[in-house]
Image (cartoon, grey):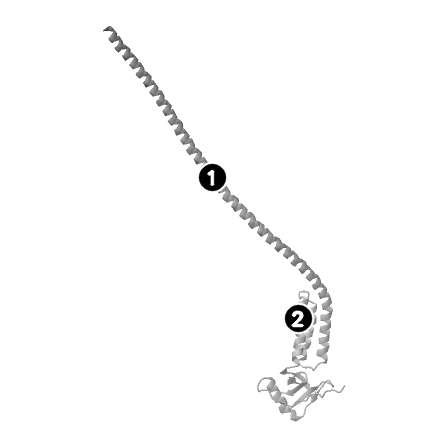
Amino acid sequence: MHLMKLQRFLWGTLGASALLALTAAGSQAADELNEAIGIRSEANTQSRDSQAVVDVLSDKTDELLGEYKQILRQIEELRIYNSKMLELINSQSDEMASLSEQIDQAALVGRQVTPLMLKMIESLDRFVQLDVPFNLEERIQRVADLREMMDRANVSDAEKYRVIMEAYQIENEFGRTIEAYQGSLEVDGAMKTVDFLRFGRISLVYQTLDGQLAGYWDQPQRQWLALGNEYRNPVREGLRIARKQKPPSLIKLPIAAPEVL
């Protein structure tokens, strides 16, 4: 009887101890599990943080790479630009050298051409003085203007030469045109207003306004000579033709005969 109670007591005591042991073991395992779960959770958190850092670094790397590529493009553009600028500078340097040479040559030409232009003006003056005396005041004034122009420092040599050539061209045109104009002339000892008729340089005649007197310029004798009455109508017709009051037609005018050399 006492033995059975002892056995039950021992069993209860051992069972409680075993239960306590199991409970303690289970609690330890739970703690270890929780610790493992915590470690895992912490590892996951660290992994997420690390990935976030990696993502940030990756974005920053992409941004820096984009900036690097853009800088490379700018460097290439600047290289091309500098190359073109160098070509332009070289071209401008060549142009400056050419202009400098042209200026030196222009100064030399100016020194050479000035005596030539003065000779041309003198020749034109002598020509006007020896030519048939039509529009004489106008032509003498043109020569005087040329002389005055040569003393002006604000007129370039090129412009002076152009004006002189223009004066020569005007004189040249006189040789192939006809003209009617009025002027004053001493006729029979008295100054009269007359109509002048010029046919190129081959004939220069006049007629008084009343049509009663007419004459012509004799170039070999360099004087005015009277014309007979038979020239009144031809001169009058020539004046009308020159003034475009009638169409061109044949008229009779005095012309100096060619000289035998």
- From this view, report whether residue 259 is shown above or below residue 109: below
Residue found at the very far bottom of the displayed protein: 230
What residue do we see at 57% from left, 49% from top? Answer: 78
The residue lying toward the viewer, choosing from 146 and 72, is: 72
Residue 30 shown left or right of residue 197 in the figure: left
Q: Residue 223: image x %, image y %?
A: 72, 85
Which residue carries the number 2 mark?
162
Which residue carries the number 1 mark? Answer: 58
Q: Report the quarter where the N terminus lies.
A: top left
SS type, badge 1: helix
Residue 222, image x, y percentages:
73, 84
Considering depth in this image, is 116 or 193 the residue closer to the camera? 116
Q: Amino acid at mark 1?
A: Ser
User: In the rendered view, would you say 130 is above or below 1?
Assistant: below
Location of the C terminus (image quadrant): bottom right
Can you name the residue that lies furthest to the top here?
2
Q: Is residue 188 above or below residue 169?
A: below
Q: Identify the image quadrant of residue 259.
A: bottom right
Q: Is residue 129 visible?
A: yes
Q: Nearer the viewer, residue 34 or 138?
A: 34
Per the image, label 2 sits on a secondary structure element best described as helix
Residue type of the residue flagged with mark 2: Arg
Q: Is residue 118 above or below residue 102?
A: below
Q: How many residues crowd mark 1 within 10 Å: few (<14), some (14–19), many (20+)?
A: few
